[in-house]
Amino acid sequence: MAAFRTAAAVVDALPEGELDRRIRTRTLTDLRGIGPKTGAAIVQAHAGEVPEYLARLEETFAELVPLADDVAEFRSALRGDLHTHSDWSDGGSPIREMAEAAIALGHEYVALTDHSPRLTVANGLTAERLERQLDVVAALNEELAPFRILTGIECDIHLDGRLDQTDELLGRLDVVVASVHSDLRAESAAMTERMLAAVANPHTDVLGHCTGRLLIPREQREGRRQRPRPESAFDAEAIFGACVEHGTAVEINSRPERLDPPLRLLALAVELGCEFAVDTDAHAPGQLDWQANGCERAVETGVDPDRVVNTWPADELLEWTAGAR
Ligand SMILES: [Zn+2]
Ligand SMILES: [Zn+2]
């Protein structure tokens, strides 16, 4: 990290306006003490992003760094996770292994939210496969009780705002996370309308990774590589307002490459009175431990743990997802 300390000192010593000019003209690395890596981090930090280099460090060393007390306390209030994937869609592990890892972490429940049919690149579940999965989960739950696998889906939001699964099946699931996975660069008005429809859908419980941003590149199934991408544009005040109105929780996505919503939007959601779900979006058992990332951001923005639906006991949570609250 010494290189970063040096670079920070160089930036601090620049005259007013000089940093902006250097970034604009791409001459930052001409300065002694700033290399390509530190230069890129400065540009990203200046744009209000988590620098790619820091995001990578966080991903690599997260479990080695002790949590701050308030973050540890927040995390210990979580009873489960509402967004996880198994090898039925694009996760790497069987349902049982995900559940056993969740039990080992001290969770009381975990929602299994594999992808919906339209997301063919992620091996999304057809209605028939989802029905079969429900039977598998029911059998596992008998065996693993009192731990509970909540049935669920990460349901794609179609361009017109409809959800990508039958109403009948959505109605039978414990937890519905609705997420945008396509046309992320749409103009704000269209994206807002699309998200509003999904948030207002009575089946939707959680709005997943709302901006869709990716901070660092990542490998996907079959070696597909996704490049970093900026936030989608939408009217955040309208979306979070609708979340309050319709009782849809805003997800705090803990994946290191997502960390979604960004802090300024998370602060806005807090201010508007939203409920939240601190989720890992885990695609492997080890990733269930990523909740600390989300807790850190929740603490930073003053999220009240009582407003986080996965701090609630399973019965209370299920009453809420069933719309009884
Ligand atoms: Zn997703
Ligand atoms: Zn997901």
Image (cartoon, helix red, strand yellow):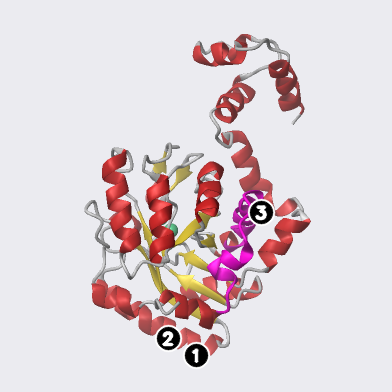
Badge 1 marks a residue whose secondary structure is helix
Compared to residue 74, the image places residue 166 above or below, namely below
Q: What is the magenta segment's predominant secondary structure?
A: helix
Compared to residue 288, the image places residue 319 above or below, namely below
Q: Confirm or deny contact between disc 1 and disc 2 (CB under 8 A).
A: yes
Q: Position of residue 286 (x, y in %)?
A: 59, 61
The three-letter code of the residue at mark 2 reads Ala
Residue 174 shows in the view: no
Q: Is mark 2 within 8 Å of ligand 2?
A: no
Question: Quick one: quadrant of the N terminus?
Answer: top right
Residue of label 2:
138
Q: Quadrant of residue 233?
A: top left
Q: CA distance from mark 3 to mark 1?
A: 36 Å
Q: Is residue 301 magenta?
A: yes
Task: Name which residue lies at 63% across and 56% down.
Answer: 295
Side of 198 relative to 38 (left or right): left
Task: Name which residue lies at 65% across and 57% down.
Answer: 292
Residue of label 1:
142
Q: Is mark 1 within 8 Å of ligand 2?
A: no
Crowding near the residue tagged with mark 2, few <14, some 14–19, many ≥20 C-alpha atoms within 10 Å = some
Task: Choose between 242 and 231: the one closer to the eye.
Answer: 242
